[in-house]
Image (cartoon, grey):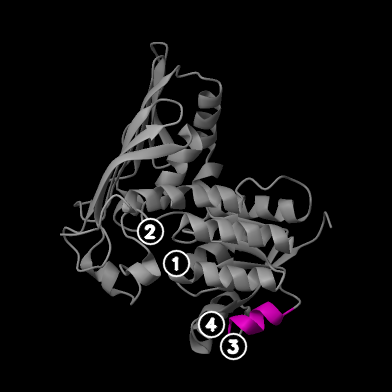
Amino acid sequence: MADKTIRFGILGCGAIARFHADAIAMLDNAELIGVAGSSLESAQRFALGYQVKAYADYNEMLADQNVDAVCICTPSGFHAENTMQALHAKKHVVLEKPMTFTKAEAKAIAAEAEKSGCVLTVICQLRFSEDVRRVKKLLADRALGELVFCDLYMKYWRDHAYYASSNWKGTRRFDGGGALMNQGIHGIDLLLYLVGNAKVVHAKNCTRLHDIEVEDASMAMLQFENGAMGVIEASTCVWPGFERRLEINGTRGSVILVENQIQKLIIDGETLVERQQRAGNGTASNPTAFACDLHALQISNFIDAICGRDELLITAAEGGRAVALIEEIYQFGLQGR
């Protein structure tokens, strides 16, 4: 099976589905063969651009023996149900974030993946960044000493048109949350991946600007298992929007990650990296302003795991860590204006 080409179907025809399609096209051992959407018409429009099959519905895709794996790119509220359907059909799964909305559902998905014998990965593509991997090794080597503060800032801007562009964005049922569960989950995954598990000490969620059911501003105080303290600040109503910023401070040094690039690294009094702030604000004001190369790296690892060439780096259990912390933040109080 080592030389097998994995044939993909994509469920969903929105913006993120195109990132998956483009990432698959970058890989020699992957092939996109079809897509299913909320309607045959939407699938046909998407399929035309990639010269692939348009399935009448998801069930037809799952029944196709030519499909080895499914990328689930539907609205978040459908992720759990769509994933279970794929696993029952014995399809491998690439699941977009968030994998689901609760810790309990995330555990159920992980259990079903193990039971099915299929490989399931949750998109946490930032972990594949070269700079993120460098920071991970520095922390594993304790190069920053004992960690003191680990802070995550995600002060984004989403205009009213963003939420009005679909009937599911900003809803509890289908979006699950706002500044955290939808916009901020990649940053929270990165924080937990690099620093380790944390408990919520205090949190506040509110809706300040948008006419939505979920939070557009959130603040949480954290206590990490390694003894460090930290804060998470997340919003979709800060103009003009600022790039995600992760600051890790220790007794021997500090590192600042802006998006997935090291902006500053100081160890034992020596400045090893110092970069100027990049022009523009990227996904801080435009959620699709990123490349698909990190998606391609993660899907490549997924394929290697299916073929027995490598260990799967992001399992269902890993994908559920950020969901669990966000759920804990939400449980600290009802959202309100």
Q: How many labels does the image show?
A: 4
Residue 121: quadrant of the picture: bottom right
| Element class at badge 2 | loop
The magenta segment is 56-64
The three-letter amino acid code for the residue at tag 2 is Asn
The three-letter amino acid code for the residue at tag 4 is Ala
Q: How crowded is mark 1: few (under 14 residues within 10 Å), some or many (20 or more)?
A: many
Residue 260: quadrant of the picture: top left
Disc nearer the start of the sequence (2/4): 4
Where does label 1 land, which residue? 76
Residue 265 in view here: no
Q: Where is 159 relative to 279, above or below?
A: below
In front: label 2 or label 4: 2
The three-letter amino acid code for the residue at tag 1 is Ser
Quarter of the figure with the N terminus:
bottom right
What's the residue at 63%, 83% (across, down)? 59
Q: Where is 248 relative to 88, above or below?
A: above
What's the residue at 37%, 33% (across, down)? 223
Q: Marks 4 and 3, Cα distance to the nearest angstrom?
A: 8 Å
Where does label 3 land, which residue? 56
Outermost residue on the top side: it is: 269
Disc nearer the start of the sequence (3/1): 3
Where does label 4 land, which residue? 43
**Pointers 4 and 3 in contact (C-beta within 8 Å):** yes
Q: Marks 3 and 2, Cα distance to the nearest angstrom?
A: 28 Å
Q: Marks 3 and 1, Cα distance to the nearest angstrom?
A: 21 Å
226 or 287: nearer the viewer: 226
Q: Marks 2 and 1, Cα distance to the nearest angstrom?
A: 8 Å
Whether residue 62 appears in magenta in the rendering, the answer is yes
In front: label 4 or label 1: 1
Q: Where is 79 relative to 243, above or below?
A: below
